[in-house]
Amino acid sequence: MRQTIRLPDYAGSMLRGAFGHALRQLACMTRQKECAGCPLLATCPYPAIFAPPAPPAHRLQKFSQIPAPYIIEPSDWGSRVLVAGETLIFHQVLIGRALQELPLILLTWRRALARGIGAGDGTADLVRVVHCSERGDQEIHRPEVGTIATHDQGIALVGKSDDSPTSTATLRFETPLRLQQNGRALPPDRLQARTLLMALARRANLLAEFYSPSALIDDFATLSATCADIREDKNLRWLDWTRYSSRQQQKMSLGGVVGTWRLEGPLAPFAPFLQLGKWLHVGKETVFGLGRYTLTDGLPGDISAGPLRTCEHPCQLVEKQATIT
């Protein structure tokens, strides 16, 4: 840190706001207030990364906006004050076109941190960038060097043979999970395994459809039917979170559930989506880092770094860790 930064209980919204503002300053050529109607909309990296426009038509539903190709993962929950000389570490997952814009994204973070973030606009310098994968961490960039080291920009779903009809998975949600029904986030007692598993499948499928050659799933009905034989054990609680929306000029309540959720049964069809979900998150407001979980227990499949090899057309992903002092 160069100047004191005050982090709120959850810094995801704060970091996203700083990122978006700096990205628009760097990328926007016309300085129009709104992207809609801009003659450069189709080629500008700002909407492509920060707020991708929806297609005019879609075979399943009408979208007002498609999922953004990035996720910001701030440090642990809890407000903190970081003074000069201390370090802030956070992660960012990049998907699809955002991978190609890594140099611009790194410059964006440098600009955002120099401009100031958080209450009081504390400033910082980007010190290093680390690529994180299942194989380990690799430092890929330091501003004084300037270049970005070659690194794997994808993960692969590696299938494993599994003769057992039953497997288990325990998800530990570290940030609020917001699965909605009729526009409202469901409390713990109304959440069901089917709701979670199909949300994971839909999110992975949408990201693959918009950011890779084709979708992952052809038959949602058969996949959904499999959920009837899955047993669950939940130890979840509600966690409130409120953020201020500068665009809407109001506070927004975005609480959700945290805790553990154990699943048991024929999970093999969902194994790729459970594994991908560790990177992609699940539920609403994932771009802020909500719906993040760790996964334990055995599943008939695994993830490794490297070129994409299985699961038809999985999304390409890379996770960036930024160390700031």
Image (cartoon, grey):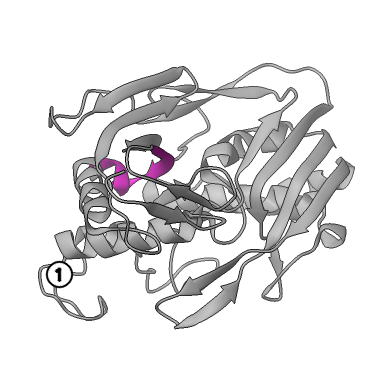
Residue at horizontal 69%, vertical 44%? 173
Asked whether 310 or 289 is in front, the reply is 289
Q: Is residue 227 left or right of residue 206?
A: right
Residue 121 horizontal/vertical position (percent): 32, 61
Q: What residue would you read off at disc 1?
A: 40
Residue 209 horizontal/vertical position (percent): 45, 51
Residue at horizontal 44%, vertical 28%? 155
Quadrant into which the C terminus falls = top left
In the image, residue 192 above or below residue 135: below
Residue 249 appears in which quarter of the rendering?
bottom left
Asked whether 39 or 187 is in front, the reply is 187
Residue 23 horizontal/vertical position (percent): 24, 59
Asked whether 192 or 158 is in front, the reply is 192
Q: What is the span of residues highlighted in magenta in the rendered image?
A: 87-100
Asked whether 154 or 176 is in front, the reply is 176
- Residue 219 seen by the camera: no
Q: Amino acid at mark 1?
A: Leu
Quadrant into which the N terminus falls = top left
- Residue 87 seen by the camera: yes
Per the image, is 93 magenta? yes
Q: Is residue 247 left or right of residue 9?
A: left
